[in-house]
Amino acid sequence: MENHQSLSHLDPQGQAQMVDVSTKELTVRTAIAQGRVRMLPQTMAAIAAGDAPKGDVLGTARLAGIMAAKQTATLIPLCHPLPIQKVEILITPDSELPGYTIQAEVRTRAETGVEMEALTAVSVAALTLYDMAKALEKSIQIEQICLISKTGGKSGDYKAPSLPPLEEVKPL
């Protein structure tokens, strides 16, 4: 059996475990994640005009993202429940996409970071946007969900390299 001691989420037998963060220092930690939701221009126009059959697409997606960040530990098996102090969701129209860019910023003062909370917030906001607009278009695409930056903690700060242009991203 290989040595699993360098992988914090594995015990000596190679089994998944929740990392013990009880001795780590409380620090302010922030994470920003982003994703894109691509759609037809007419779908984007209907959402912007408030003409979606299910109502306020962007407002509902924003609230879903906030709620999701607070529920991350119930969705991702090895995540720690964290006292979330801030969740901000920005949904920005992008006519060149066409579609929307979703960005989530999550902040806490805790023993571990909030990267998963930010990524979960973006993911669920994007899924909610799809759900709210699927009556207008079934071919909406959720793309490029990634961590943009994080601050705080033992591993220090992180800033993602720039995203590849959309035309370089190959669908599965």
Image: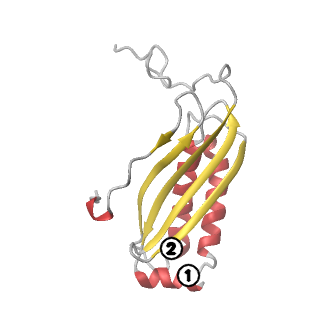
Residue designated by label 1: 48
Callout 2 touching callout 1 (CB < 8 Å): yes
Q: Position of residue 90 (x, y in %)?
A: 59, 64
Label 2 to label 1: alpha-carbon separation: 8 Å
Residue 56 position in % (x across, y down)? 63, 77
Which element is circle 2 on?
strand
Judge left or right: residue 156 versus residue 39. Answer: right
Q: Quadrant of the C terminus?
A: bottom left
Across and down, in percent, residue 166 comes to: 32, 63
x, y percent for residue 13? 44, 15
**Image vertical order of residue 15 relative to residue 68, above or below:** above
Residue in the image at 52% along x and 85% along y: 46
Tag 2: residue type? Pro
**Image vertical order of residue 1 relative to residue 40, above or below:** above
Residue wearing tag 2: 93
Can residue 168 be spotted in the picture? yes
Q: Nearer the viewer, residue 153 or 59?
A: 153
Which numbered disc flags the more N-terminal residue, 2 or 1?
Answer: 1
Per the rendering, the mark at residue 15 is none
Q: Is residue 136 visible?
A: no
- The 10 Å Cα crowd at callout 2, few under 14, some 14 to 19, many 20 or more, is some
Q: Secondary structure at mark 1?
A: helix
Q: Nearer the viewer, mark 2 or mark 1?
A: 2
The quadrant of the rendering that contains the N terminus is: top left
Disc 1 residue type (three-letter): Ala
The residue positioned 63% from the left and 34% from the top of the image is 80
- 160 above or below 4? below
Q: Is residue 84 above or below residue 18?
A: below
